[in-house]
Amino acid sequence: GESVGLHLPTLSVQEGDNSIINCAYSNSASDYFIWYKQESGKGPQFIIDIRSNMDKRQGQRVTVLLNKTVKHLSLQIAATQPGDSAVYFCAGYNFNKFYFGSGTKLNVKP
Amino acid sequence: NAGVTQTPKFQVLKTGQSMTLQCAQDMNHNSMYWYRQDPGMGLRLIYYSASEGTTDKGEVPNGYNVSRLNKREFSLRLESAAPSQTSVYFCASSHLLTGGNTIYFGEGSWLTVV
């Protein structure tokens, strides 16, 4: 089966610093990955995705890196802001299903 | 732009009661999903429907049933609620069966079974 996880439970960063959130996956057949942000009391919101034939993708203030050799994903948030405080999940797609990790809580200190 | 809408937002049930969570999407997506989220844990797939007329079990299907009523709607039913089913439930949808298409979530349904 698929598992996606190995998140740190909580990451605290200073406002303005860069944040790096990591995720590992177990199934090398996963061909698509997504990062989600979940604020308290809300559903997960899409941040950025990456296909398995890529190793990097950039969005607005966010970059996702994929290392297929070690089955590892990371989400980099530049110039972290208080509004970035949330739980971040990675998800892998395989066999018609998305598999989610347990999440990393990002705390942004003013 | 509604996206994925699920109801109710909050529900308290007594053990043994039944209820149905409703979900509808207006994005013309083929695939729909029901997840549960427990404290400190990620989203676990209960059931999914890859296309209208099909449903399949996910990781934690026991105690639940689903119905893909039409392309827009996918309901989740608890026939005899148990305290272990206290959780936040999320409905989601995505466009195609194959990967490479973002999955969109509803705002969640908070269910407490006492």
Image (cartoon, coloured by chain):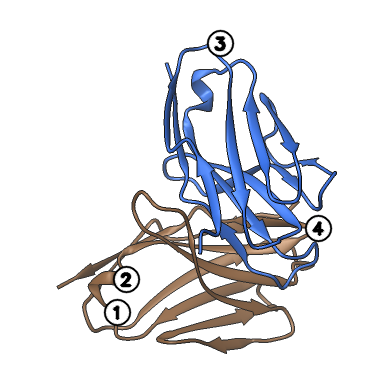
Badge 4 local density, few (<14 within 10 Å), some, or many (20+)? Answer: few
In x, y percent, where is residue A106?
Answer: 33, 65
- Marks 1 and 2 sit apart, C-alpha to C-alpha, by 6 Å
Chain letter for the blue colouring in the rendering: B
- Marks 3 and 4 sit apart, C-alpha to C-alpha, by 34 Å
Say which amino acid is labelled 3.
Gly
- Marks 3 and 1 sit apart, C-alpha to C-alpha, by 46 Å
Badge 2 local density, few (<14 within 10 Å), some, or many (20+)? Answer: some
Q: Is residue B107 above or below residue A18?
A: above
- Marks 2 and 3 sit apart, C-alpha to C-alpha, by 41 Å
Q: Which residue is mark 4?
A: A95
Of discs 2 and 3, which sits in the foreground?
3
Q: Which residue is mark 2?
A: A84
At 71% from the left edge and 34% from the top edge, which residue is drawn?
A: B66
Quadrant position of residue B110? top left
Label 2, secondary structure: give it.
helix
Answer yes or no: do the residues labelled 1 and 2 have beta carbons within 8 Å?
Answer: yes
